[in-house]
Image (cartoon, rainbow, N blue to C red):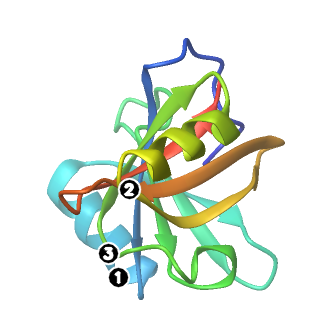
Amino acid sequence: MPDPPKAKAGSIVWTDLTVPDATAIRDFYAAVTGWRPEPVSMGDYQDFSMRPSDGGEPATGICHARGPNATMPAQWLIYVAVESVEKSIGECRRRGGTVLDGPRPIGGKPFCVIQDPAGAVAALIEA
């Protein structure tokens, strides 16, 4: 994810796809959607931001399931802005959900990945 955008709590601010081979999937989505990949350094490997073909703001990220993303599920993941990640984690657990990853920082803001009682997954990032 590029620097986390400023957003109001409750809004969807980003989507990522985490997979074992981000390079192959990057090429798939570039061909299918017309997105243009841009490398994002992760130290010893690169993830990718995908921009619309007209060069607008990044539309999504495609990430390798390694390093800080090693525990991420292989699926499209939405990021929802919340007022407090810690408070949201507490509510998640009280209501039968599970924290799958985090909390940890991303772009200087705390985030986590949760699973609701029905099995759906979402990321929460502090607004």
Q: Residue beneath label 1, please?
A: 24
- Say what amino acid the circle numbered 2 marks: Gly
Circle 3/circle 1 CB separation < 8 Å: yes
* Vertical relation: 19 (above or below) 59: below
Q: Residues within 10 Å of mark 1 (few under 14, many from 20)?
A: few
Quadrant in which the C terminus appears: top right
Q: Residue beneath label 2, please?
A: 97
Q: Residue at x 38, y 56 (%)?
A: 97
Q: In x, y percent, where is residue 8? A: 55, 11
| Residue 50 appears in the figure | no
Q: Secondary structure at mark 1?
A: helix
* Vertical relation: 124 (above or below) 33: above
- Say what amino acid the circle numbered 3 marks: Ile
Q: In x, y percent, where is residue 115? A: 36, 59
Tell me the tag on residue 92: none
* Mark-to-mark CA distance, 1 and 2: 32 Å
**Mark nearer the N terminus (3 vs 2):** 3
Q: Residue at x 48, y 73 (%)?
A: 72
**Mark nearer the N terminus (1 vs 2):** 1
Circle 3/circle 2 CB separation < 8 Å: no
Q: Secondary structure at mark 2?
A: loop
Tell me the tag on residue 25: 3
Q: In x, y percent, where is residue 54? A: 37, 29
Q: Residue at x 41, y 86 (%)?
A: 21
Q: Secondary structure at mark 3?
A: helix
Q: Is residue 39 left or right of residue 65?
A: right
- Camera-near label (1 vs 2) is 2
Q: Residue at x 34, y 38 (%)?
A: 53
Looking at this rendering, what residue extends furthest in the top direction?
A: 8
